[in-house]
Each structure stands twice: as C-alpha cells, then as structure tokens.
Amino acid sequence: MKARSLFLALCFMAATLPASAPEGGGPGGGAPSLMPWPQSLESKPGVHRLTQNLTLSLEACRDGRVTAAAGRLLERVRLRTGFPPQPPGADPRQASLILRCGGDGEPVQTPNTDESYILDISPGAILLEAPSPVGILRGLESIAQLIALDSTSYLLPCLRIEDRPRFRWRGLHIDVARHWEPVDVILRNLDAMAAVKMNVFHWHLSDDQGFRVESRRFPRLHEIGGEGKYYTQEQVRAVVAYARDRGIRVLPEFEMPGHTTAWLAAYPELAAAPGPYHVESAWGVFDPSMDPSREEVYAHLDAFIGEMASLFPDGYFHVGGDEVNGKQWNSSARIREFKAGNGMKNNRQLQAYFTRRLEAILDRHGKKMVGWDEIVHPSVPPTVTVQTWRLPPRFAETLKLGYPGILSRGYYLDHMHPASWHYGIDPGAGLTTEDAGRILGGEACMWAEFVDEEIIESRIWPRAAAIAERLWSPAGVTDVEDMYRRLDSVDAELERLGVRHRSSFPRLLRNILPGGESLPVAALAEILSPRGLAERQRARRYTRETPLRRLVDILPPESAVGRDFDLLVDRALPVPSPADRAAIRESLEHWRRGALKAVPVLERSFVLAEIVPVAESAAAACALGLEALDRLEAAQAPPTAWAGEAERVLERARKSPEIAIAIEPAITKLVHAADSRHAPRGTIP
C-alpha cells in the first residue's frame, strides 16, 4: 500500500483502558506503527539506538522455538540495517536484548496457551518477559515492528508494553481444494500470520474440486481426488512444524458429508447415490454427499480420521458440514426408509445424526469437532465448536445455545471488502457477557475460486492484518485512519519477510501488456478495484480451468488512491479550503488524462481490451466531477438536463460487472452536492 500522509494517533487515558499511543515514542514524535495494537502501552523518554546488531541473552528459555525465533529476529535486523551478526549467548550485563521465559511450552499448543508478554525498552536494554514461549514469540514480532530510524541511527522507542490477546482463536482459513497452493505459498502465509500475531492456520484440504493430502490408508483419495496435486505426509509434517515454531496451530478441514465430490470420485461406495463421480471443475453447491445411513461410511471415516489424527497433532479437527442440499438423500429409497425407521422427519435431523456419529469418532481419536454453522441442532452436544459464516444473527444464536463460537461472517477476504469494512466487524458486539464468554475468536477466510499461487497473497495481505487486530486488540481500538497508518507499515514489514502480496501485480501486469507500456495501465489501475465473489460469479461462468490473468484477477483488492480521495472530498464539502479545492481538481484532471492515455494501450492487448469501456467511463466520471466542482465553486445551479445526464454518466461508471471505479463514490458526492435535489448549492464557495 502507498505511504499516506493522513494519520490520527489513538488516545486513551488510563492503563486499564485500551493502550494509549505514546507521545514522542516514535520517529518524529508520532505513535509506533504496531499492529495489532497492544492492550497497554506506556511511552518513556528517549530511544534505544541500534549501533550494531542486537546482542542476545536467553534466561530460562529452554524451548527451541524461542531460540529459533530470536535468531530470525536477529537476521531481520541484520537484513534491514546491514549490521554484521553478533555471537549468541551474550552476558546479560552486556546484552542489548534479554529474553526471560517463565516456563516450557506444551508439546501441542492449545487455545488456552498463554500468549501474554511484557516488553520494556530503555536506552540501555530491551527486556522481553513472558510466562510461555509463545508469549516470547509474540513480543519478538512487536520488536520487529518497532524498529525505525532518524537522522542519527536505527532505533526503537523507549516504552513499556503489557500485552495479551482479546480472543484466543485468531485464524486464517486457506482453501487449497479449489485451486492448489504449493508448500512455499503456505509457508509465506505462516510467516505473515506470525507477524500480526495470528495463531490458527485453518487448512481447507478437501472439497468438490480436490482432495489435497496423501492418505496411505486410502490412497485413491489423493491419487484420484488430488489429481496429482496434493501434500505428502512429509510435507504436512513440515508445515505443522513450521507453524508450531511460529506459535501457530494447524487445524485441518475435511468436508463431510457434503462438498465431497472429489472424495466420492475415489470411493463412490460411500455416496448416497450410485456413481461414477468425477472431480468437479466448476464452482457451486453440488448434489453428491455421503450416505449417513450406512455403517460402512462410519468405518471408513473412523479409519481415515485415525490416520489424519496422527498427522495433525492439534486437538481440534474441522469436518465442514455446510451446504448439504439433500437431493441425493431425498432420492434414495434406502435413506428415506432409514429416516422413517429412526423417527427422522427431515434432512436436518439426518445430518444431526451424522454429526453425532462423527463427533463420537473424533472423540475416540482425541479430537474436538469444529464445523460450519449448519451442524447446529438441538441434538448435537455443545462440546462441538461452531464456525459461523452465514447471516449475523446466527453467531449470537449459536453462542446462546451454549456452543463455543468462531466468527467468520464479515471476514471473507474473497468478497473484496476494504480493510476498514472487516475492521468494523467485532465478534463481541451486542452480546451479553455470558454469551460473549463462549467466543473463542474468529477467522479470516480465503476461498479459492479466484486465486492461484500467483495471486493469493495479494488477496490476503495486508487486509487480514486488520482482522488480526480486531481479534487481538481491545474492543475500543477502532480508529480507522490510524489503523490504515499502521497497516501501511505492516504492509512494508510483510514485504521484508518475503510475502509476495506487493510484487504480484507489477509482475503479472507486465505479462499482459504490450512491451514497455505499463505506466498508463498501472496509473489507471490505481483507481480501480476488483469486485467480489458474488458479482464475478454472476458476470460469467468460471471453472478451475479458467485462466486467472485478466486485470480483474490481479488488481489489488483495495484502492488506496480511491480511499484517500474519498476522505479528501468528505473533508472539502462541509469545510472547504483552497488547498482541498486544488487537490480535488488536480486529482480529477490527472485521472481523466491518464484514463484516456491508457485506452490505446489497452486496445493493443487482447487480455486488456475488455477494460476499454471501464477506462472511458472513468474518464467521463472525472470530467463530470470537474463540472460539479466548477458549479460548486461558482455557486451556480445546474440546468435541469444536467442532473439527468450526470446520473447516466455515474450509472455507466458503476456498470462494470467485475471491476469497480474506486473514485466513483467520491465523484457521486461532488455531483450530489452540486445538484440542489441532493444538497444546498455552494457547499464549496
């Protein structure tokens, strides 16, 4: 994201309230760019200057994760500053960084693992204390974010942080079934998760479009269902170990009884209707499902879960459970007879029976069940954890029924909402104390209909960091502008970590442009943003084989330029100033000219030619915005016909089914301000 001049520091008054932004604690007297923002932060005079790489001392830190994480921090400091590495094991009296750990970590991390830490930075030393190794890992990430520089040296602000997460489950869900993601993509996302203190990687490993884990007990699952793209068991163990080193649990998800077409392509005898089945390449909700009436299905699942339980050590196991349309169950005479014989009146009761049987299998293998909110039923015990993705009331209803809850509604990254939109979704909002006490946390979700290994990181980061903050920081930390200020810094830190969210767009844009002509299209792209999953699915038919290399596929999800322009217009309309007037005019002229210059370049690329109407609509909208500005400045009422024509221009600007013109909402505000039907004239005198 682009560096931004707008910022508002968070200001809170007491240590018992959300952390206050320090005065003078960062470069230029501004607040540190920490994200997530800590529970308590007290600024102190001075800075800790880095004149060489950090020297490290470990006190009572026997967990190898602490040593490894400290080594990674030292390497990040070296790469950023260029200082030569220092030998480990410094005398605490001479060490610049002292890590003090209160005890060893558990063999398997749990949601109850203590992630709190205290970070105290003074001019002479940096002391990081935590009761557990995971707390040390969280504090080390804060240190990395605090490194800044001034005219003299690299430095850290002197401060004291006392920090802990608000929610104990802060996850990122990645679907690798619809589009396969190689191991290196997963590892980079784990690095990014650790940087913003997320602690659950939800690995969506099977669906209608693929089965992505090697099963030695049932090899056809990966041989047929995986179609050659799956993780070996050695790769799974490596990912789990990599995640644990970063304080991240790995939650596997295997969809059942629906979303199982790839599973049933391998083992059709488990299905509720005769096969054959083939792995799906389209998107949607499909009929194939497992047969809950047959004991052979449960024997198969018992053996499969037993194998996976040893591969995934986490105490939780996700079984999906969503979007079972029941068509095969309704069509099967055997299943209808089974329901009648067991007093079941509908498919919801049948799925609840399946869920209870599955929960018992998981319990025998030492696992707790997690499922999407369709599994909720009065007969399903409240020992099951429910992940809510449907309409907002469902989360509150689930908690009220006694189920531990994970919120994902509002955190779907594939819908292309801006970071601010996700930031405004609070799992605890409007709940009673009792119901809120059942919240485990939340998960950002990256579904894979419209991403592959080249695109996925740009769709997750940095927006997921805003969700990470909502799940870690105090509920009162809600300043959107300060969130964006700090998100820009996190964005740069993620790039230093090797995450490819920034680099994918220029690289992929070069591939679809006529040689040497990227600038006009890149400039146009700054004021565009892709529409989300629902709009794109309505626009045309997509499958797994559809190439994802059009402009809509590679555009960044959020336009920083559009956001800043919207803020500028909001400020200028009620309280105009010559500087704001000039900035609006200059921006609109720049974008109008740029869009027109991009048209001939777009026409020379068969991939980009479809964007020509978008560029023309953007240019026309900018011209309209300039007209509105002229009328506002002149306090001149527009002709009657002008308002109708203006609405037609704006409608064309909104019309593109897959790409939004990000500056259109702000232009609409200008037009409405100039039109007496919407607002008094002369708002900008």
Image (cartoon, grey):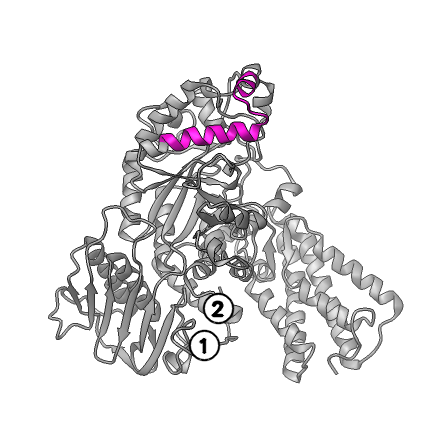
Q: Is mark 1 on a helix, strand or loop?
A: loop
Amino acid type at circle 2 is Gly
Residue 476 is labelled as: 2
What amino acid type should be assigned to the residue bearing mark 1? Phe
The residue that appears at 31% across and 38% down in the rendered structure is: 312
Residue that appears at 72% across and 63% down: 621
Total numbered labels placed on residues in the image: 2
Task: Please state the horizontal and vertical placement of residue 371, each as a whole percent of the image.
Answer: 46, 39
**Residue 459 falls left or right of residue 93:** right
Dominant SS in magenta:
helix
Q: Find disc 1 in the rendering and name its residue.
A: 12
Residue 45 x/y as whole percent: 31, 84
The answer to whether marks 1 and 2 mark residues whose Cβ atoms lie closer than 8 Å is: yes
Q: Does the magenta stretch include residue 343?
A: yes
Residue 7 x/y as whole percent: 50, 75
- Residue 226 appears in view: no
Left or right, 222 with respect to 617, comes to left
The residue lying toward the viewer, choosing from 386 and 43, is 386
Span shown in magenta: 337-361
Binning the other alpha carbons within 10 Å of mark 2 as few (below 14), some (14 to 19) or many (20 upward) gives few
Image height of 492 relative to 255, above or below: below
